[in-house]
């Protein structure tokens, strides 16, 4: 059998099988395996497959896992959570450093918790501070918005007191927290509840060379349920604190009620105690990968969010108590809240960087340094092991961008004149003001990379002409091929872009925090009295930053609305999720769900049941992200089943992207181990492909995996056989190359002579010790 797995963006079974008549043989509308209609009963006709005939092709279609119905547009709100979850899996390779590895995971989980608090705090800033505290408490602003009229103190209505306004507005961030819980719970039931193939752990499988082969790796149901309870409780506690803290401050003023003051202290103590419980839950040991952990902490999962919800109700009742002398003036404590979150995130990122550096320094020495300048080979981790901290910093920046964008736009909408209400916290204005210098740094970096690509394209022209010696020279055609190759190399500059962006974000964010807390004024106000050049720069940065952060928020909303209505736009977003949600939710339960927790068990079950029932062998053929799924599924098989598998990967990012960014799980040791376990493995790639590349296993790993780079285009100019110019294929349509059919034929020929007879369950433990080397 040949089992085909498509890549990012998805496709149809008809295209994969090259036949308009296909039949679903197993699966559902979300993910399924298809065959040609003529091959449905192939197992009942042995002469069809074993008597010299072609193998049975099957197509595994999984694109609906990431681009389903319109509700997937809501996943755009979860982008910072997805990015911080990636940081968890980017730890460097480590041997014998289990405590440091656990510390790394703990710091990432705490960073994810701060993102939840930040998002809910931004909703509190919009609903509680800007809308009902500032605008509804100011007659001029409330008069421009009739829907806030019943909250205005001038009406003397029941809802006009500050505490009751805050309690009513708390419904908005509470609803947001409930929405996040609902999305996480629904996807948890659909994804994390898919049980992998049950088997015992394999001896000799260490943390760094076989992590993806552990029985419980793709079954994180218990951890996600526990983290979901903790993050939901954290969101509700954030809302409760935003409601109760202003009322408690009012009760401490001279003339305040002693009874209410005592109740306020007790309530704040209860909130602090519950927050400590939430921290304890997040700090508990992470994933259980060596076994299938089917237990659930049911009492914790139910009682922790319910307890936080009860405290929120008590906080609303406490704040709603009548206080005649209490009036809303100025801002709520937004600067202290957002400042504390920003400071905590910065310290966590620095601590994560120190931990990652220790892990990277403790890695074993490389067995083959290889070509030091080649980014696609060798065991080097991106940014010398600091890829995880850099990505965690970007997640915090995305969270700040989204929260600041919402606050800025709502403030501008409520206060058209810019004079009736104080506006959002000063820190958010400072953070928006650092966006222009950050973009300037990125612009300089992009200019440098563009210059490097231009020089490389000029150098490639001579190489292209040498590869097509018998063709009449066409300068424009040569330039186009050389330019495509040069642009494909920009993928290898990704670590540089991420590293510079993260470092600049950290430094500029620290400067913004210091400026906001040190001056308690906006950048324009802080520059008052400075030289004209400084004043002009501050005004330009503040104005441009406000527009840019607002534009980013508008683009996010527009994209999400379009994706909700347009299936093609939703599929484009699905491509982003194809790359970002391959990994299980280990750091943040509100991240988009891990489709591999459905796809990998699907492929494993299909391969294991077919080989067990027929005793046959199969070629596992994966393109792009499909090659990553294929490798992960092969790791999950028993050794005897892996020995009957041949891998054919093309356009594969296994080393070029995953090996560099996720070295602990796709490093050279892990890929070399997979190469030893499967019967044989061949990999195809092109120099014009910006995603796929060579596997580049170190010396001594057995037969060569990588084919020589495929020609692209297949023909340089017009010939009698190809009268029209051949396209530059890049990452697509590898099947069009004759080398693809030839490599597949060789793999099938290698498998067919050693076709074993069907074996019983007990015989599988004997493995593949007797099979010949590749």
Image (cartoon, rainbow, N blue to C red):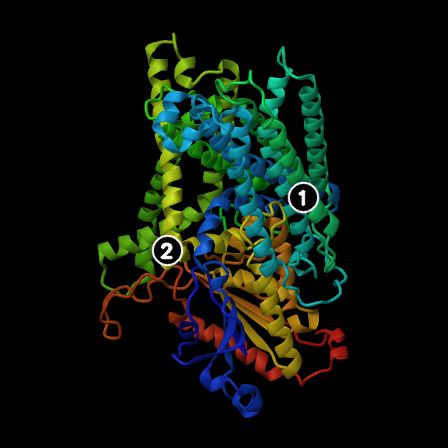
Determine which quarter of the picture holds residue 230.
top right
- 111 or 669: which is nearer to us? 111
| Residue 409: % across, % down | 39, 32
Residue position marked by numbered label 1 in the rendering: 306
Can residue 94 be spotted in the picture? yes
Can residue 774 be spotted in the picture? no
Q: Nearer the viewer, mark 1 or mark 2?
A: 1
Residue position marked by numbered label 2 in the rendering: 565
Could you tell me which quadrant the N terminus lies in? bottom right
From this view, report whether residue 153 is shown above or below residue 550: above
Q: How many marks?
A: 2
The answer for how far apart the CA atoms under marks 1 and 2 are is: 35 Å
Determine which quarter of the picture holds residue 131.
top left
Q: At 52% across and 34% down in the image, what residue appears?
A: 168
Residues tagged 1 and 2 counted as in contact (Cβ below 8 A): no
Q: At 55% across and 55% down in the image, what residue appears?
A: 582
| Residue 356: % across, % down | 63, 39
Which element type, helix, strand or loop, lies under badge 1?
helix
């Amino acid at each position: 059998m040949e089992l085909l797995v498509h890549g990012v963006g998805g496709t149809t079974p008809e295209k994969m099988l090259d036949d308009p008549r296909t039949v679903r043989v197993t699966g559902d509308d979300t993910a399924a395996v298809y065959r040609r209609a003529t091959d449905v009963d192939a197992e009942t006709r042995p002469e069809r497959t074993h008597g010299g005939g072609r193998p049975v092709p099957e197509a595994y279609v999984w694109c609906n896992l990431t681009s389903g119905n319109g509700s997937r547009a809501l996943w755009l709100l979860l982008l910072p959570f997805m990015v911080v979850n990636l940081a968890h899996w980017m730890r460097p390779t480590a041997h014998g450093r289990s405590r440091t590895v656990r510390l790394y995971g703990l710091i990432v989980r705490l960073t994810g918790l701060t993102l939840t608090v930040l998002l809910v705090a931004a909703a509190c800033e919009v609903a509680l501070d800007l809308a009902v505290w500032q605008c509804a408490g100011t007659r001029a602003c409330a008069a421009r918005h009739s829907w806030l009229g019943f909250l205005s103190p001038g009406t003397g209505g029941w809802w006009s007191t500050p505490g009751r306004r805050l309690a009513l507005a708390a419904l908005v961030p509470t609803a947001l927290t409930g929405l996040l819980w609902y999305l996480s719970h629904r996807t948890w039931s659909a994804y994390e509840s898919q049980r992998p193939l049950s088997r015992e752990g394999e001896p000799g499988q260490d943390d760094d060379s076989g992590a993806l082969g552990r029985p419980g790796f793709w079954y994180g149901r218990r951890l996600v349920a526990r983290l979901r309870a903790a993050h939901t409780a954290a969101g509700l506690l954030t809302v409760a604190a935003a409601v109760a803290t202003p009322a408690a401050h009012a009760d401490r003023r001279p003339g305040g009620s002693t009874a209410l003051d005592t109740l306020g202290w007790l309530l704040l103590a209860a909130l602090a105690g519950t927050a400590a419980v939430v921290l304890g839950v997040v700090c508990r040991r992470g994933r259980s990968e060596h076994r299938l952990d089917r237990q659930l902490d049911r009492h914790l999962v139910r009682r922790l969010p319910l307890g936080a919800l009860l405290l929120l109700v008590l906080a609303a009742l406490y704040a709603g108590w009548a206080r005649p002398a209490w009036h809303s003036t100025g801002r709520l404590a937004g600067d202290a809240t957002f400042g504390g979150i920003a400071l905590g995130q910065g310290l966590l990122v620095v601590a994560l960087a120190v931990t990652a550096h220790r892990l990277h320094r403790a890695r074993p020495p490389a067995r083959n340094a290889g070509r030091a300048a080649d980014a696609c080979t060798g065991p080097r981790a991106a940014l010398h092991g600091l890829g995880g901290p850099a990505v965690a910093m970007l997640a915090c920046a995305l969270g700040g961008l989204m929260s600041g964008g919402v606050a800025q736009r709502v403030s501008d909408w409520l206060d058209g004149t810019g004079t009736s209400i104080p506006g959002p916290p000063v820190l958010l204005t400072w953070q928006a003001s650092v966006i222009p210098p950050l973009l300037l740094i990125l612009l300089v970096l992009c200019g440098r990379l563009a210059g490097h690509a231009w020089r490389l394209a000029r150098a490639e022209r001579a190489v292209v002409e040498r590869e097509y010696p018998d063709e009449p020279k066409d300068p424009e055609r040569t330039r186009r091929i050389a330019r495509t190759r040069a642009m494909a190399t920009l993928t290898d500059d990704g670590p540089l872009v991420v590293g510079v962006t993260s470092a600049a974000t950290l430094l500029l964010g620290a400067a913004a925090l210091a400026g906001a807390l040190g001056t308690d004024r906006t950048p324009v106000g802080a520059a008052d009295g400075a030289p004209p050049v400084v004043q002009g720069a501050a005004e330009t940065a503040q104005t441009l930053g406000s527009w840019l952060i607002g534009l980013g928020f508008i683009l996010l909303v527009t994209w999400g609305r379009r994706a909700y209505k347009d299936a093609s736009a939703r599929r484009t977003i699905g491509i982003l999720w194809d790359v970002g949600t391959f990994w299980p939710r280990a750091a943040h339960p509100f991240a988009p769900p891990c489709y591999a927790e459905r796809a990998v068990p699907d492929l494993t079950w299909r391969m294991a049941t077919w080989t067990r029932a027929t005793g046959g062998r199969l070629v596992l053929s994966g393109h792009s992200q499909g090659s990553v799924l294929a490798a992960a599924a092969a790791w999950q098989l028993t050794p005897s089943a892996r020995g009957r598998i041949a891998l054919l990967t093309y356009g594969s990012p296994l080393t070029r992207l995953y090996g560099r960014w996720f070295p602990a799980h796709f490093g050279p040791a892990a890929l070399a181990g997979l190469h030893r376990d499967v019967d044989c493995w061949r990999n195809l790639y092109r120099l014009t492909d910006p995603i796929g590349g060579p596997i580049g296993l170190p010396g001594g790993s057995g037969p060569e995996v990588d084919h020589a780079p495929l020609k692209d285009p297949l023909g340089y100019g017009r010939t009698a056989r190809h009268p029209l110019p051949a396209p530059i294929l890049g990452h697509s349509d590898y099947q069009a190359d004759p080398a693809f059919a030839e490599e597949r034929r060789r793999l099938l020929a290698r498998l067919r002579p050693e076709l074993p007879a069907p074996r019983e369950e007990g015989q599988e433990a004997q493995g593949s010790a007797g099979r010949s080397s590749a």
